[in-house]
């Protein structure tokens, strides 16, 4: 528990130090908390913390993530970083360690992050397939003040599905591809053609190039979207264009082609590509 000297305002510790970190309660020793004197915790518990930092139960209150503090406290106790298998909150842990300015812990977290990146970067599988549907669109054209003509055209709608065991690769590809919807004033509105976020290493997107005989107003009316390479602005108007971009990005990231469907001899007219990386 915390006691305060009424004259100096200094903290007087008696027995275990009780903490309230973001609503989570902990109990430890002053020696543990001040193991690294140059850290934020070392400064907090040097004997001159303001009384206002105590909660209603006399515990020292720290307005940070209470769940993550468990691993920080154990590092102070044991001198090593013990995390459960499959721990996925390294970024959160790094932010908390940075707040507390525990340099040895920050260095250990950096090693763990490099190990994770290395593990993800070695072995990976990538599968990309594209489906095309042809939609017959009916619309009216104004030929004169009181004259309208019924017209039709075909719109090619592409749907791509990607699966990769390396989620970072999907994020990279997502950053290189973007959709835009032209407007009647020749400007373009950036929208997302990605149908969902990276989830379980899977992504999906949909786009439809505008046919020359489809008026821009009709194209926008149906909320079709063009697919472009960022930042070049090059439009991808076919499944082959899309798979070529996937191919270039995958090869640059160390993947190699394992299979091509349907014709292994005609990669850019394929519908499905499978890559591996060892």
Image (cartoon, grey):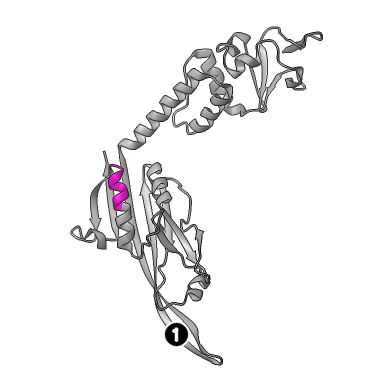
Q: Where in the figure is residue 17, as x and y percent of width and height?
A: 67, 13
Most foreground residue, 251 or 278: 251
- SS for callout 1: strand
Q: Residue at x 33, y 65 (%)?
A: 238
Q: Is residue 113 left or right of residue 69?
A: left
Query: Which quarter of the image is occupied by the C terminus?
Result: top left
Most foreground residue, 227 or 278: 227
| Residue under pointer 1 | 151
- Note whether 121 is above or below 71 in the view shown: below
Most foreground residue, 101 or 83: 101
Queried whether the magenta region covers residue 250, the answer comes back as: yes
Q: Dot 1, crowdedness within 10 Å: few (<14), some or many (≥20)?
A: few
Q: Where in the figure is residue 202, as x and y percent of width and height?
A: 41, 49
Task: In the displayed orientation, state which residue is furthest to the left.
Answer: 265
Queried whether the magenta region covers residue 248, the answer comes back as: yes
Q: Give the quadrant of residue 132.
A: bottom left
Q: Which residues are magenta?
A: 247-254
Q: Give the quadrant of residue 227.
A: bottom left
Most foreground residue, 26 or 50: 50
Judged by its main secondary structure, the magenta piece is: helix
Q: Residue at x 38, y 29 (%)?
A: 115
- Note whether 13 is above or below 95 in the view shown: above
Q: Residue at x 58, y 22 (%)?
A: 100
Q: Where in the figure is residue 136, as x and y percent of width and height?
A: 41, 78
């Amino acid at each position: 528990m915390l006691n305060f000297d009424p004259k100096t305002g200094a903290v007087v510790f008696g027995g275990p130090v009780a903490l309230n970190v973001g609503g989570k309660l902990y109990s430890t020793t002053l020696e543990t908390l001040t193991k690294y004197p140059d850290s934020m915790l070392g400064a907090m518990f040097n004997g001159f913390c303001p009384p206002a930092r105590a909660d209603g139960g006399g515990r020292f209150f720290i307005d940070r993530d209470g769940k993550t503090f468990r691993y920080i406290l154990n590092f102070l106790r044991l001198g090593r970083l013990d995390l459960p298998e499959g721990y996925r909150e390294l970024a959160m842990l790094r932010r908390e360690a940075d707040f507390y300015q525990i340099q040895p812990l920050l260095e250990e977290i950096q090693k763990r992050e490099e190990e994770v990146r290395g593990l993800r970067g070695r072995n990976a599988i990538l599968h990309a397939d594209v489906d095309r549907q042809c939609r017959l669109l009916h619309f009216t054209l104004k030929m004169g003040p009181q004259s309208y003509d019924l017209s039709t055209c075909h719109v090619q709608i592409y749907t791509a599905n990607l699966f990769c065991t390396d989620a970072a690769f999907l994020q990279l590809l997502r950053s290189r591809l973007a959709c835009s919807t032209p407007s009647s004033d020749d400007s373009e509105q950036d929208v997302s053609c990605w149908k969902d976020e990276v989830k379980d290493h899977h992504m999906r997107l949909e786009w439809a190039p505008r046919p020359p005989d489809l008026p821009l107003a009709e194209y926008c009316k149906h909320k079709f979207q063009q697919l472009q390479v960022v930042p070049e602005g090059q439009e991808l108007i076919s499944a082959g264009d899309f798979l070529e971009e996937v191919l270039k990005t995958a090869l640059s990231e160390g993947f190699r082609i394992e299979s091509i469907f349907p014709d292994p001899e005609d990669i850019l007219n394929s519908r499905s590509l499978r890559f591996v990386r060892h």
